[in-house]
Amino acid sequence: VLECYTVLGEMDFLLKVVATDIHAYERFLHHLLSLPAVREVHSKMVVSEIKCTNELPLDLIDQ
């Protein structure tokens, strides 16, 4: 798990997960679903990355 957020709406949490392959991801899901507090899981897989940054545009603050 790289990132975890609490969110509003249909879901309570959003996790960003990286797995070596689909089998590792399935093991992770199985573990996640075995936790008493987890009722259901919805997954989305990234097909390609368009933009990825963690830099804040601080130069825009002065404008």
Image (spheres, rainbow, N blue to C red):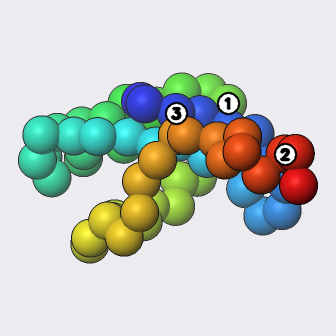
Is residue 38 visible in the rendered structure shown here? no
- Locate residue 11 relative to residue 36 in the image: left or right: right
**Residue 51: percent from left, percent from top:** 41, 63
Q: Secondary structure at mark 1?
A: loop
Q: CA distance from mark 2 to mark 3?
A: 26 Å
Q: CA distance from mark 2 to mark 1?
A: 41 Å
Q: Which mark is residue 37?
A: 1
The residue under label 2 is which amino acid type?
A: Ile
Labels 2 & 3 near each other (Cβ < 8 A): no
Name the quarter where the N terminus is drawn: top left
**Residue 5: percent from left, percent from top:** 68, 38
Nearer the viewer's eye, disc 1 or disc 3? 3
Which numbered disc flags the more N-terminal residue, 2 or 1? 1
The residue under label 3 is which amino acid type?
A: Glu
Q: Secondary structure at mark 2?
A: loop
Which numbered disc flags the more N-terminal residue, 1 or 3? 3
**Residue 61: percent from left, percent from top:** 84, 45
**Residue drawn 59% across the image and 34% down it:** 4
Residue bearing the label numbered 3: 3
**Residue drawn 52% across the image and 33% down it:** 3
Badge 1 crowding class, 10 Å Cα cut-off, few under 14, some 14 to 19, many 20 or more, is few
The residue under label 1 is which amino acid type?
A: Ala
Q: CA distance from mark 1 to mark 3?
A: 19 Å
Nearer the viewer's eye, disc 2 or disc 3? 2
Residue 46 is drawn in which quadrant? Answer: bottom left
